[in-house]
Every structure is written in structure tokens, then in C-alpha cells.
Image (cartoon, rainbow, N blue to C red):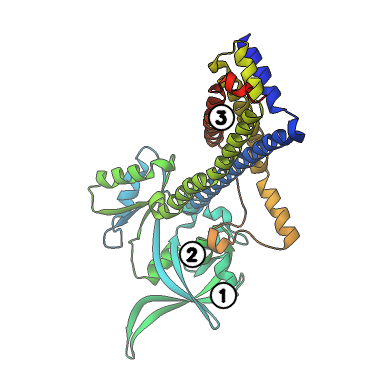
């Protein structure tokens, strides 16, 4: 029964209409502030989670999970290494490749790029890059035909289309009577690919593996092996174990190392945004303190009467703690509902704003993607709600304690 009357009195004070409802107005502002703070935190964290998920999926769709390369830049006996890799548990594909730098020229435009020599049949099996070709097939890269597939952004900057010719300039030179001259080769554009990652769409050219070997005079050697794994998260450990099983003497890398700066920056930004936006919840908590202090000041006479009727200091403290807890529950619950709703529809909301105002929030050249994905993770929602409610609970301690310290005689003296 004691808990029941403390709850009834606490909620009644929160709905107080005295002083023209000013206390109720301040309590409503506290709820709204807490709701907006919680919703903002959930939306921001969801956007960061979605950005990380989208970045990871796009990277894994166009690049290998791990690479095994020779220390001298070439892998001579790559067939034996490939057979050993395919026999390793967790390795689904092992594809030879040639990686080199070059310049692509078309008319007066000359751009630097990376040349990747690939085996068309194996490339379709090993990675998802072959699925991103827009107006060509990976099988069009036939040996001896000297065809290339350009990234969409690179083709746009060069101003070339399917069927046009470009000139590839290799950095290695050839000795001639006139001196050392760079090796050049005229190539036909077989098509373009668009991976959704500007890094690849702007700086990658696909060439047949045999043609690349002839161009860079590598004979039967390749730069290394690109590995596809059943569990990409195990790539760092698996590629090291594979290199050791082959006797060592290899340079190994994986997707987590090649793109570590992306994910580290996302995690750092996510942590900083959580701390910074938590100040909004802190402001709402201070509003709760102010609300309860005003209620305590207004209800001094009521508190004295309750004490006179036998209410203990602990009961008075619980009466006013109920109000702060109620504000915290309502504000946190509404904020969580609003945040989850906004996070799940943030992409359509952003597109609508971009269409109305004619602006673009994300530039693919900077953020590697042009849309704004979001992923609601219940762990983040739980953490945000728990921290917000904890701050609200802490905010009730001082006003409730002050109310419990009220002396009946002192309070009634002025009534």
C-alpha cells in the first residue's frame, strides 16, 4: 500500500496545474529533450553501423579476402602454392593475378591507374567483380585480343566508351637506339564496371592475365594469389598460416589490413559521436533536476503534512524519485521508438531532402558511396536507453533527498 500511495502522490505532483501549469510544462520539456537526445543517438549510431556494413560488403565484393605474394614482387611457382591453398580448409578459391602500375591515355587525357591481370574463368568464380560489369562480360578479355575493362569513373574521366581505343604506358622502359623508352600498347575498351567503390571505379583496369604477363615481361610468373575464404573475418590468421605451411618467404596481406583506416575511423567517429551527443541527454537530465526542485519547493506544505501524518523520509524520497523515474521511462521509450523509426527510413528521408533542396549529402569521391545506409543494432539501442535512464535516475537523487530532509515544523511555520 505504501508503494501505491507514493506512486499516486508522485504522479499527481508531476501533473500539477499550479502556477498555471508551469511545472507540468517544464516536465513536458524534459520528456521532449530526453526523447530527442535518445532518438538522435540511435539514428547516428545506426547510420554509422550501416555505413560500416555497406563499406565492408562493397569491399569484399570487389577485392580478395587475402593475398599471397612473393617477396620480390613475383610468385614463380604459383601453381604449387595454389594447389596447397585450395587444399586448405576454409579457402574456397585461389586465383593468380598480376598487379602493376600504368598510365592510360586517350587523346590529350592521361591518367594513372592500376592494371590487374586476371584469368577470366577464375575471376568469375573467385570474386564478385565480374558481376559488376555493365556492358561487357569478363570472358571478353580473351588472350591476345588486348582488350581491357575500365572502371566507370576512369572511363568517364578519359571520355571513352565500349569499342574505343586507349594507350597503356607501362613504367618499365625498353632499350632502343634512341634511348630507354616506356613500353606502350594500344588496347580496345571491352566495357566498364561499376563496383560502387570509387577507389576501384576510378583506379582499376582489368586485363587478361597472359596479356599482362607479356606486357610486363613476367613470363610464367604472377604477382601473387588472391584468396577467397568461407569466413572473411578469419583472413588475417588464415593467410599467415598458409604462408607458414608453404615454408615462408611470402608477403601476405588481407582486406582488414588494406582498408584498416576506413574501419578504424568509423569506430573512432562512432565513439566520439556517442560521447558528444550524450550531452543532449545530459541537458535533459538537468531539466529533470530543475523540474523536481521546483516541485519540491512548491510542495513544501504538502510534504510537511505527509510527514506529520507519519510518512517516513524514505517514503518522501520515493515519492519524488517516482517522478524522475517516470520522466526517464517516458522520454527514453518515446526516444527509442522515434529513433528506430527514423533510422529505418533515413535513406528515403535523405533522398527526399536531396530532391527538394537539390543537394547531395554524400559524395562518392569522398565517402566511397552516394547513399546513406542505416542498420539498427539492438545492442546500441539497449546501451543508449540504459545510459539515458541511468542519467535520469541519478538526476532524481538530489531533489528527492532534499524533499526527504524537509522539517514539518519549519515548513508549516510560514503557512
Tell me what residue is drawn at x 65 percent, y 61 percent.
360
Helix, strand or loop under label 3:
helix
Q: Position of residue 185 (x, y in %)?
A: 46, 77
Q: Which residue is mark 2?
A: 204
> Between 222 and 413, which is closer to the camera in this rendering?
413
Q: How many marks?
A: 3
Instruction: State the CA–CA distance, disc 1 to disc 3.
Output: 69 Å
Residue 353 visible to an observer of this rendering: yes
Residue extending farthest to the top is 1
Q: Which residue is mark 3?
A: 399
Q: Is residue 206 left or right of residue 171?
A: right
Secondary structure at badge 2 equals strand
Q: Nearer the viewer, mark 1 or mark 3?
A: 3
Q: Which mark is residue 158?
A: 1
CA separation, marks 2 and 1? 13 Å
Cβ–Cβ under 8 Å for marks 2 and 1: no
Q: Position of residue 322 (x, y in %)?
A: 61, 23
Amino acid at each position: 500500500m505504501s508503494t501505491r500511495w507514493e506512486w499516486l502522490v508522485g504522479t499527481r505532483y508531476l501533473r500539477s496545474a499550479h502556477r498555471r501549469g508551469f511545472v507540468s510544462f517544464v516536465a513536458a520539456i524534459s520528456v521532449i529533450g530526453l526523447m530527442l537526445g535518445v532518438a538522435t543517438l540511435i539514428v547516428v549510431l545506426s547510420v554509422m553501423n550501416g555505413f560500416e556494413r555497406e563499406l565492408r560488403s562493397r569491399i569484399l565484393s570487389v577485392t580478395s579476402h587475402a593475398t599471397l605474394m612473393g617477396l620480390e614482387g613475383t610468385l614463380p611457382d604459383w601453381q604449387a602454392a595454389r594447389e596447397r591453398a585450395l587444399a586448405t580448409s576454409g579457402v574456397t578459391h585461389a586465383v593468380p593475378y598480376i598487379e602493376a602500375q600504368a598510365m592510360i591515355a586517350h587523346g590529350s587525357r592521361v591518367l594513372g591507374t592500376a592494371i590487374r591481370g586476371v584469368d577470366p574463368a577464375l575471376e568469375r568464380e573467385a570474386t564478385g567483380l565480374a558481376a559488376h560489369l555493365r556492358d561487357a562480360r569478363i570472358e571478353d578479355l580473351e588472350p591476345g585480343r588486348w582488350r581491357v575493362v575500365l572502371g566507370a569513373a576512369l572511363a568517364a574521366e578519359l571520355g571513352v566508351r565500349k569499342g574505343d581505343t586507349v594507350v597503356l604506358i607501362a613504367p618499365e622502359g625498353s632499350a632502343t637506339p634512341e634511348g630507354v623508352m616506356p613500353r606502350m600498347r594500344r588496347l580496345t575498351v571491352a566495357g566498364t564496371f561499376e563496383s560502387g567503390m570509387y577507389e576501384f571505379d576510378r583506379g582499376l583496369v582489368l586485363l587478361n592475365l597472359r596479356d599482362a604477363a607479356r606486357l610486363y615481361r613476367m613470363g610464367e610468373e604472377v604477382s601473387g594469389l588472391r584468396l577467397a575464404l568461407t569466413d572473411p573475418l578469419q583472413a588475417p590468421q588464415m593467410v599467415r598460416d598458409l604462408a607458414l605451411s608453404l615454408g615462408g618467404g611470402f608477403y601476405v596481406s588481407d582486406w582488414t589490413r588494406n582498408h584498416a583506416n576506413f574501419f578504424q575511423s568509423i569506430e573512432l567517429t562512432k565513439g566520439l559521436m556517442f560521447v558528444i551527443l550524450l550531452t543532449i541527454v545530459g541537458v535533459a537530465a538537468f531539466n529533470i533536476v530543475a523540474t523536481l526542485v521546483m516541485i519540491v519547493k512548491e510542495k513544501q506544505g504538502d510534504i510537511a503534512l505527509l510527514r506529520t501524518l507519519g510518512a517516513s523520509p524514505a517514503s518522501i524520497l520515493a515519492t519524488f524519485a517516482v517522478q524522475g523515474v517516470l520522466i526517464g521511462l517516458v522520454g527514453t521509450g518515446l526516444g527509442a521508438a522515434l529513433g528506430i523509426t527514423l533510422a529505418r527510413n533515413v535513406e528515403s528521408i535523405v533522398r527526399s531532402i536531396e530532391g527538394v533542396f537539390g543537394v547531395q549529402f554524400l559524395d562518392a569521391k569522398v565517402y566511397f558511396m552516394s547513399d546513406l545506409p542505416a542498420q539498427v543494432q539492438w545492442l546500441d539501442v539497449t546501451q543508449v536507453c540504459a545510459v539515458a535512464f541511468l542519467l535520469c535516475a541519478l538526476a532524481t537523487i538530489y531533489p528527492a533527498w532534499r524533499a526527504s530532509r524537509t522539517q514539518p515544523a519549519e515548513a508549516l511555520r510560514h503557512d
